[in-house]
Structure formats: structure tokens, C-alpha cells
Image: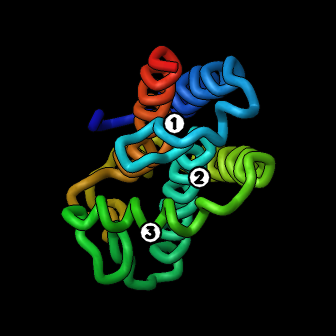
Amino acid sequence: MKKNWTKAELIDEIARERAKLEATIGALSRQDLAKPGVTEAGWAVKDVLAHLFDWEQRFLGWYTAGLRGQIVQLPAPQMTWGDLPDLNQQIFEKYRRRGVDEIFTESRTSYRKILKTVQTFSDADLATPGRFTWTGKWTLGDLVAGNTCQHYGWATTLIRKWAKRQ
């Protein structure tokens, strides 16, 4: 992860990577968006989008809980980063029956919300290790990037590779 993000750099990178993701998805047919097989686990494009907005919302929940002085358990209560495959499967199961339109609406709403939240951060908030105790060894900028622009880049690459195989 990149250290010492400035707010301007992070917002630009989030917008740039999101635009690439939207363009990649926009090139697909409606049928393609619900077709399984994008991941080895059988996710469709809509499932990848649900995964992304769940992680955006997860970050917003961590941040809000931290501001309230609550205990923040990353990545989820009673889970460690080593449990990510199980957590990601739980996320898939949570959203898998939702339709393309609902997923797209939630995805865009979540994106706007996280971008609005990032705009409230100072450069020091984003780049100072330990500024927020709940972030542990990471900076706030690391966690924002991991749950937005870096995650969007992963999804864009994944979807593009899948689309080429179709």
C-alpha cells in the first residue's frame, strides 16, 4: 500500500480507477453482467460490484465506529485478515440473489458516500500513522485506498480478463 496519501491524490486516484471500472462494465451487455464465471468462485460482474460496495460500506462502518470510540474489529467481528476467503464468500452469499439494477444502484450510492466522506479528511488524517487507533499499523489513507481505488483496479482487471475469454 502507498503511504502518505494526500487528500487530492487519493480523491483523484479513486475517481480515475472508478472511471476505468465503469467504462469496463459499460462495455458489457446486460446479460454479461449477471453471467457467472468472472471469478473462480463463480461470481458474475454484479457480484464483483456487490463485493466492492460491501467493502466500501465496511470501511465507512469502521470509520464511524472509531469516531464514536467503539471497538473496531478489522476486517469483521471475530475474523482476521486470514479469514478473507470466508468473509468474501459471506459477502457473495449476502448479495447473490439481488438483481443487476439493485446492485448498480447500491454501488453508485456507496461510491458517492465514500467519496463524500474522503473529502472530509485532512492530509494529516490520511497519512499519519496512529492518528486513529483503530487503523492499527495502517494509515487511514491505506485503508481508504484498499477499499476503493486499489479494489476498483483489481475488479477492472478481473472483469477485463473475463470479458476477453467470452
Which residue shows up at 73% across the image and 25% down it? 29
- Mark 1 vs 3, N-terminal side: 1
Q: Which residue is mark 2?
A: 50
Which residue shows up at 45% across the image and 18% down it? 165
Whether residue 130 appears in this view of the structure is yes
Position of residue 114 measured from the top left corner of the image (x, y, whole percent): 62, 50
Whether residue 116 appears in this view of the structure is no
Determine the secondary structure under disc 1. helix
Q: Which residue is mark 3?
A: 90
- Mark 1 vs 2, N-terminal side: 1
Towards the viewer: 165 or 66: 165
Which residue shows up at 68% across the image and 23% down it? 28
Q: Is residue 150 above or below residue 103?
A: above
Position of residue 130 measured from the top left corner of the image (x, y, whole percent): 27, 61
Q: Is residue 103 left or right of residue 53?
A: right
Towards the viewer: 88 or 59: 88
Q: What label sits on residue 76 in the rendered view?
A: none
Q: Which amino acid, by three-letter code, is at mark 1?
A: Lys
Q: Which amino acid, by three-letter code, is at mark 2?
A: Ala
Q: Quadrant of the N terminus?
A: top left
Give neighbour class at mark 1: few <14, some 14-19, many 20+ (Cα, 10 Å): many
Q: Is residue 36 above or below residue 23?
A: below
Determine the secondary structure under disc 2. helix
Q: Is residue 30 left or right of residue 56?
A: right
Instruction: Calculate the distance from the C-alpha at mark 3 to the C-alpha at mark 2.
Output: 12 Å
Residue 108, by quadrant, is: top right
Q: Which residue is mark 1?
A: 7
